[in-house]
Image (tube, helix red, strand yellow):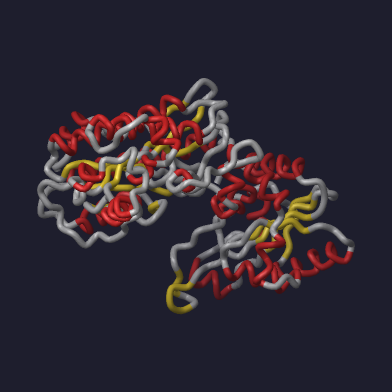
Amino acid sequence: MFDKQVYINRRLNLRKKIRSGLILITGNSESPMNYPKNTYRFRQDSNFLYFFGLDLPGFVGVIDIEEGKDCLYGNDFDLDDIIWMGPQPSVNELGQSVGIPCTHPMKELASTLQRAIRNGRKIHFLPQYRAENILMIDRLMGISPALVGQYASTELVKAVVSLRSIKEPVEIAELDKACDVGYLMHTTAMRLAKAGVPEQELVGAIEGIAIGKGYMTSFPIILSQNGETLHNHDHSQILTSGRMLLTDAGAEITSHYASDNTRTFPVDGKFTPVQKDIYSIVLDALNKGIELSKPGVTNQSIHLETAKVITAGLKNLGIMKGDVDEAVANGAHAMFFPHGLGHMMGLDVHDMEDLGENYVGYDDEISRIDQFGTAFLRLGRRLQSGFVLTVEPGIYFVPALIEKWKSEKINSSFINYDKAMEYIGFGGIRLEDDILITDNGSRILGAKRIPVTIEEIENIVGKG
């Protein structure tokens, strides 16, 4: 938790963006695994964390625009709780710690909201993703669960996105810290990798780094020799000589700021000529994407420029053909690069995605391109100083996709299908760095960049 003035300022800034009414920010409650007292690890709602700072279940925050008052609703712990959990702070003490002297028992929230409704006041709330909070809004405001999403406040969504998109210095420090843990996770996977080691053993080792520090992973680890499956959570294989291993993993530290990096490397610690060819193209695309990332440039244009790097590289290998610009304009590159270049990152590994991807990644100026591959670009809008995002190009040889496009002669003017078929079984390569947009360009987050050049990779993989 940051100093209370951070949260006071955030709520003041939010209040300036909303014309009138009440702002309702729901916290999360415990989620049971199989019976009520056996719960998953608690994860607070990111918007509640951002504005109210309390990493505890069972709270709701209310910001009254007209009265200029913030209130925290929650119940004090009783003796039964204290017996099991030890001494606990009161709701009032918790409120004071984040600059909120106005606190109430949870039962009073209903009368606060009903009074506002009777007086014709607007109640702003964000899209909800937890069933218990959807049901709470139904209970308190009489909105059917099926309609809660339709009543979410677009005005509030846009206000929150505008604030959370620009990272404060205290947030950047946390993101650097998360990326430092990510560095340890990825270099550990590289050092332990060798033929005969189970994938699951590497997953356990790198997840243990986060857990051992009191943290958690920022998403379920992706680690697989079948890198052509973009989000491959199957870890059942044994590392095999001659194959490439893709590892996509990150840490979520105590403050819940996240990292998200991907590295792909040969199990043997030495690239074959074919692996080196494809890897070099992806690395060139990664470096180009980072080089182009600066304030005022649209991420959509950067995505398309990295697609041209990939297309030109594959053309040099005889896998693609024709004019590079035309090939990208026609979406031919997407058979090999079928996803977006990156996404926002912060309190969420896909930052604010619960608020709606189009609100976070696009705006009135930049619209999503409705074309296979490029349509999956989560972040297209113009970059600003203070944005934190990932840059993650890749090349994948997906058998089903290659066979479908070949049979339907899709983009046959730009793809040499006979040559592409030779790469079935190769897998996929993705490389991903986390960057901060600065006043003049960008920088990679964390104290050190995870090994990424061919020489760096060959000097670390399998070295124990």
User: What x and y, as percent, mark residue 113?
Assistant: 79, 64
- Residue drawn at point x = 40 percent, y = 54 percent: 219
Furthest residue toward bottom? 35
What residue is rendered at 39% in x and 35% in y?
Answer: 327
Instruction: Pick the residue in front: 404 or 288.
Output: 404
Q: Quadrant of residue 283?
A: top left
Q: Give the image location of residue 34, x and y in percent.
A: 43, 77
In the picture, residue 39 is in which quadrant? bottom left
Which of these two is toward me, 3 or 404? 404
Marker count (numbered): 0
How far from the left and from the top, in percent, is residue 427? 23, 49
Extreme-right residue of the structure: 119
Which residue appears farthest toward the top when viewing the image? 440
Residue 363 figure quarter: top right
The answer to whether one can see residue 221 in this image is no
Q: Is residue 437 above or below residue 60?
A: above
Q: For the point 30% across and 54% down, which residue is it?
A: 407
Position of the C terminus by quadrant: top left
Relative horizontal placement of residue 227, taking residue 193 as reference (left or right): right
Q: Is residue 191 rendered to the left or right of residue 53?
A: left
Name the foreground residue: 97 vs 244.
244
Q: Is residue 357 left or right of residue 224?
A: right
Does the image show residue 282?
yes
Name the spot of residue 264 as percent of width and height, x first: 25, 42
